[in-house]
Amino acid sequence: MAQTDSQQSVSHCKACGFEAATGGEDWDRVDSPSFMRMTSCPECDSTNVTLRR
């Protein structure tokens, strides 16, 4: 079942407060040998990103 706009998960950067849809194109991605692919904040490049529902 697809999520509606009101059910869309939002990810939050703990470093600068940037928020956008989880898995959306607003987020950058970085390759890390230890963790494979990680989400990165486009505003501050932090990878300290958490999920908000």
Image: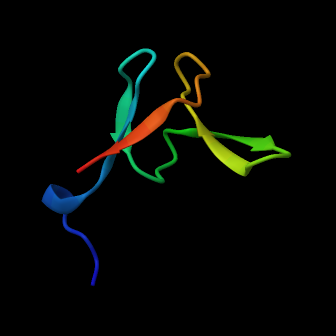
Measuring 71% from the left and 50% from the top, which residue is drawn there?
37
In this rendered view, identify the residue nearer to me: 6 or 16: 16
Question: Quick check: 11 left or right of 35?
Answer: left
Residue sitting at x 41%, y 39%? 50
Q: Residue at x 38, y 24 (%)?
A: 18
| Quarter of the figure with residue 16 | top left
- Name the residue furthest right: 33
In this picture, residue 35 sits left or right of residue 21: right
Question: From the viewer's perspective, is residue 18 above or below residue 35?
Answer: above
Task: Say which residue appears at 23% left-offset and 51% top-offset.
Answer: 53
Number of marks in picture: 0
Most distant residue in the left direction: 6
Please state the horizontal and vertical placement of residue 14, each as a whole percent of the image.
41, 23
* Image quadrant in which the N terminus is located: bottom left
Left or right: where does residue 20 sit relative to residue 47?
left
Q: Position of residue 38 (x, y in %)?
A: 65, 44
From this viewpoint, which residue is outermost toward the front?
34
Residue 4, position as x, y percentages in the image: 19, 67
* Residue with the most extreme bottom position: 1
Report the coloring of the rendering.
rainbow
Up-down relation of residue 14 to residue 8 (above or below): above
Q: Position of residue 51 (x, y in %)?
A: 36, 45
Q: Is residue 38 above or below residue 4?
A: above
Which residue is more in the foreground, 6 or 33?
33
- Of residues 44 and 25, the one drawn nearer to the viewer in this rendering: 44
